[in-house]
């Protein structure tokens, strides 16, 4: 782990409260934004029909590329409007016997959702600003690209694999 990634990891860990049993992993970059994923190992539950589930929290950080504009590139139902462009998404994910990962409702449902989001709230996550204050425009859903990142990392975690190294 190089110095840049180590510093980034420390900054991310300091930005939210981390459970003692949680596991932070840097998972990559998209359009200049760093992604990190927090697995709460203490939340693992063995569900019926051979399923296993756990809470995850994904944190996106970008203080340079989009420092003076709203972060539109990774959302599907609106624009994130936060003073800081650090934001998190909470998921409950579980996998079935066939290995597919399914997304369940957010840990803290947003007060309002865009009309076009519909039932997607139950499948994906919600967006909150780093300071915990959720702006009206931050009740957006994540894009399929973000969903794929979380899905891939959840599969690796549930199979005991290692996280991929971030892109340089």
Image: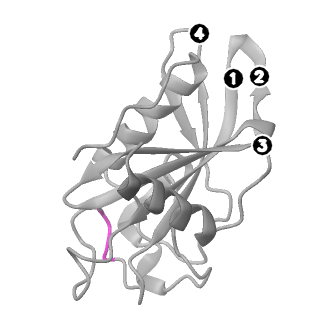
Q: Quadrant of the N terminus?
A: top left
The secondary element bearing badge 1 is classed as strand
The secondary element bearing badge 3 is classed as loop
- Say which residue appears at 22% left-offset and 61% top-offset: 32
Mark nearest the camera among 4 and 3 is 3
Query: In the image, 118: left or right of 122?
Result: left
Query: In the image, 7: left or right of 143?
Result: right
The secondary element bearing badge 2 is classed as loop
- Label 3 and label 1: CA atoms lie apart by 17 Å
The reply to whether the C-beta atoms of the residues labelled 2 and 3 are less than 8 Å apart is no
Residue 161 falls within the magenta-colored stretch: no
Where is residue 3? Give x, y as percent. 39, 54
The residue that label 4 is drawn on is 97
The reply to whether the C-beta atoms of the residues labelled 4 and 1 are less than 8 Å apart is no
Q: Earlier in the sequence, mark 4 or mark 3?
A: 3
Q: Which mark is residue 47?
A: 2
Query: In the image, 19: left or right of 1?
Result: right
Where is residue 108? Give x, y as percent. 67, 65
- Label 2 and label 4: CA atoms lie apart by 11 Å
Q: Earlier in the sequence, mark 4 or mark 1?
A: 1
The residue that label 1 is drawn on is 52
Q: Earlier in the sequence, mark 3 or mark 1?
A: 3
Residue 149 appears in the rendering: yes
Mark nearest the camera among 2 and 3 is 3
Res 48 → quadrant: top right
Magenta residues (range): 75-79
- Say which residue appears at 27% left-offset and 74% top-offset: 71
């Amino acid at each position: 782990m190089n110095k840049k990634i180590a510093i980034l990891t420390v900054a991310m860990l300091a930005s939210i409260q981390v459970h003692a049993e949680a596991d932070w992993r840097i998972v990559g970059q998209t359009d200049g934004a760093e992604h990190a994923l927090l697995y709460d190992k203490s939340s693992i539950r063995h569900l019926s029909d051979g399923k296993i589930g756990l809470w995850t929290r994904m944190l996106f950080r970008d203080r340079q590329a989009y420092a003076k504009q709203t972060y539109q590139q990774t959302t599907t139902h609106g624009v994130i409007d936060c003073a800081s462009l650090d934001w998190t998404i909470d998921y409950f994910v579980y996998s079935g016997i066939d290995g597919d990962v399914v997304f369940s409702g957010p840990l803290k449902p947003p007060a309002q959702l865009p009309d076009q989001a519909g039932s997607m709230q139950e499948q994906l996550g919600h967006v909150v600003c780093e300071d915990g204050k959720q702006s009206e425009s931050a009740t957006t859903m994540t894009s399929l690209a973000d969903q794929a990142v979380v899905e891939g990392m959840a599969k690796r975690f549930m199979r005991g694999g290692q996280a991929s190294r971030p892109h340089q």
